Image: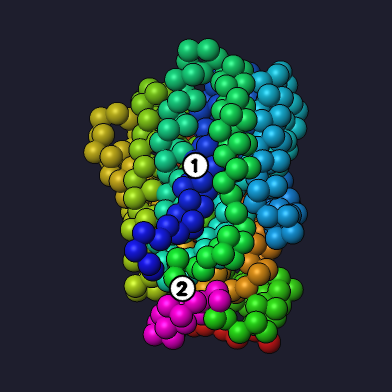
C-alpha cells in the first residue's frame, strides 16, 4: 500500500457498522418491548414471543429476495429502500392495540425492513473488500450487533419508562430515517473495483504476491472460471453448504431465544427492568469485543477452533445463568454476562467468514441470503418454543437443556463443514 493511500474499504466497514448497530439494535430491543406488552395486555409469553418468531420466519423467507436485490442493484439502492420500509413498520407498530397488530406490524413489516439492512447483505460486502483481513473486518462489522444492543436496548427501556412504548417506536422510526437512509445512500459501494481500488487496499502486483504467499485467493487473482462457477445453485449442491446451514440454525436458535427471554428472565429473578436491559446491553458490548478478537483469531488458527472456543464460553455462561433464582447471587449473573457475551459475539461473524472462504465469487450475497433461511428458522423456533415450555411448566429449566444441545450441534456442524479445506467448484 502506498504511503498516504486511503482504502475505501474501511469506510464500508464504518457505514456497515453503524447501519447494523441501529437496524439490529431495533430488532434486539424487542426484549424490552416484550416486557412492556406482556405487562400491558396480559398476553402469554408464547404468543407474545410468537410475533418475534414470525419476524424470524419472514426474515428467513425474505432473505433470498434480499440476496437477489443486493447482487443485482447493490447496497446504495437496497439499503436506503430498506430504511424507509423499516421506518414505516415502526410507525405502524406504534399503533398496536391487538395481538394481530403486533404480528403484522412488527412480525412482518419491521422484519422485512430489518432484513434488507441486516447481517447477510452486509456480510456479502466484506469478502468483496477484504481477503487477507476478512476475519478481522467481519469481526469489526459483526461487533455492531453488540454495540447496537448496548446502546439501543437500554435506550428503549429508558424511553419506554419516560414516554411509553408507542412513542419509543416513533422515535426509533425517526432515527432510522435521519441516520441510516442518508448515510447508506451517500457512502455505500458495491466493490473496490467500482472506485478503482483492489481488495485490502493492495495494488495489483501486491495482491498477486500476497495471495501466492498465503495461498489465499485474492479477488483480482481468482480464476475467473471459479467466480462464474460458484453460483448459488452449485453451492446448494454441496454438503458443506448444508452443514454451515446447521451452524447458522444453531446460532439463530441460541441468539434469538436469549434476545427475547433474557430480560424477562432477569426480571423474574427480581432484578429491575432497567438493570436487566442494561446488562443485556453489556452482553452486547462484550460480544463486540469477542467478535473482533475471535475474528482475528480465526484468521490465524482457523474458523473451526475459534468457533469452538466461542461456543464453549457461551455454554459456560448459560450454565451460570441457569442457577440464578433471585438477586442473592449476583456473581452468577456477572459470570453469565461476561462468558455468554464473549461467546456469542465470537461465533456470530465466523459463519459468514467460513462461507466466504468456501464459496468465493460474485454470488456470495445470494449464497449468504439463502443461508440466512436456516438462521431464520432457528430464530423463529427458539423464542416461541422456549416461551411455550415456560407457559407449560412455569420454568425455563427444559429450555436450558435445549440450548446446551443446540450449542453442541453448532460446534459439530462447523467441524464437519471444515472451512479450513478449500473446495473447487464442480
Neighbor class of circle 1 (other Cα within 10 Å; few <14, some 14-19, many 20+) is some
Considering only vertical position in the picture, is 156 above or below 189?
above
Q: Which mark is residue 18?
A: 1
Residue 214 falls inside the magenta stretch? yes
| Magenta span dominant secondary structure | helix
Left or right of residue 414, residue 96 in this image: right
Left or right of residue 30, residue 4 in this image: left
- Closest to the observer, 414 or 66: 66
- Closest to the observer, 308 or 330: 308
Identify the image quadrant of residue 336: top left
At a point 51% along the width and 80% down the height, the residue shown is 217
Considering only vertical position in the picture, is 154 above or below 223?
above
Indicate the position of residue 45 as horizontal and vertical percent values.
Answer: 59, 32
Residue 131 falls inside the magenta stretch? no
Identify the image quadrant of residue 190: bottom right
Left or right of residue 166, residue 272 in this image: left
Identify the image quadrant of residue 193: bottom right
Residue receiving disc 2: 203
At a point 46% along the width and 80% down the height, the residue shown is 205
Indicate the position of residue 90 as horizontal and vertical percent values.
Answer: 66, 28
Residues rendered magenta in the picture: 204-220
Considering only vertical position in the picture, is 91 above or below 376?
above
Amino acid at each position: 500500500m502506498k504511503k498516504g493511500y486511503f482504502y475505501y474499504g474501511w469506510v464500508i466497514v464504518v457505514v456497515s457498522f453503524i447501519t447494523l448497530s441501529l437496524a439490529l439494535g431495533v430488532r434486539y430491543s424487542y426484549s424490552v418491548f416484550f416486557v412492556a406488552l406482556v405487562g400491558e395486555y396480559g398476553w402469554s409469553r408464547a404468543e407474545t414471543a410468537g410475533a418475534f418468531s414470525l419476524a424470524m420466519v419472514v426474515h428467513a423467507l425474505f432473505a433470498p429476495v434480499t440476496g437477489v436485490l443486493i447482487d443485482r442493484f447493490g447496497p446504495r439502492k437496497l439499503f436506503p429502500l430498506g430504511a424507509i420500509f423499516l421506518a414505516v413498520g415502526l410507525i405502524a407498530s406504534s399503533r398496536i392495540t391487538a395481538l394481530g397488530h403486533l404480528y403484522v406490524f412488527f412480525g412482518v413489516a419491521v422484519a422485512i425492513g430489518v432484513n434488507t439492512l441486516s447481517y447477510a447483505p452486509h456480510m456479502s460486502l466484506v469478502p468483496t473488500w477484504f481477503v487477507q483481513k476478512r476475519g478481522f473486518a467481519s469481526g469489526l462489522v459483526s461487533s455492531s450487533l453488540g454495540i447496537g444492543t448496548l446502546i439501543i436496548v437500554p435506550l428503549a427501556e429508558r424511553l419506554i419508562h419516560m414516554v411509553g412504548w408507542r412513542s419509543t417506536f416513533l422515535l426509533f422510526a425517526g432515527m432510522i430515517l435521519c441516520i441510516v437512509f442518508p448515510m447508506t445512500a451517500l457512502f455505500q459501494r458495491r466493490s473496490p473495483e467500482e472506485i478503482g481500488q483492489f481488495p485490502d487496499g493492495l495494488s495489483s502486483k501486491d495482491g498477486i504476491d500476497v495471495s501466492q504467499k498465503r495461498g489465499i485467493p485474492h479477488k483480482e487473482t481468482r480464476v475467473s472460471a471459479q467466480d462464474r462457477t460458484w453460483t448459488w445453485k452449485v453451492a446448494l449442491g454441496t454438503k458443506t453448504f448444508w452443514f454451515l446451514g446447521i451452524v447458522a440454525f444453531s446460532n439463530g436458535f441460541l441468539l434469538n431465544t436469549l434476545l427475547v427471554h433474557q430480560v424477562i428472565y432477569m426480571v423474574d429473578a427480581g432484578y429491575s427492568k432497567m438493570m436487566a436491559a442494561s446488562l443485556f446491553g453489556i452482553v452486547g458490548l462484550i460480544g463486540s469485543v469477542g467478535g473482533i478478537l475471535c475474528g482475528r483469531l480465526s484468521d490465524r488458527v482457523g474458523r473451526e477452533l475459534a468457533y469452538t472456543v466461542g461456543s464453549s464460553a457461551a455454554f459456560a455462561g448459560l450454565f451460570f445463568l441457569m442457577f440464578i433464582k433471585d438477586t442473592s447471587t449476583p456473581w452468577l449473573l456477572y459470570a453469565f454476562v461476561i462468558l455468554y457475551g464473549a461467546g456469542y459475539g465470537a461465533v456470530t461473524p465466523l459463519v459468514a467468514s467460513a462461507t466466504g472462504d468456501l464459496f468465493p465469487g460474485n454470488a456470495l450475497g445470494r449464497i449468504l441470503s439463502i443461508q440466512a433461511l436456516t438462521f431464520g428458522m432457528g430464530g423463529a423456533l427458539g423464542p416461541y418454543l422456549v416461551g411455550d415450555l415456560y407457559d407449560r411448566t412455569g420454568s425455563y429449566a427444559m429450555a436450558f437443556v435445549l440450548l446446551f444441545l443446540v450449542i453442541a450441534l453448532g460446534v459439530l456442524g462447523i467441524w464437519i463443514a471444515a472451512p479450513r479445506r478449500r473446495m473447487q467448484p464442480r
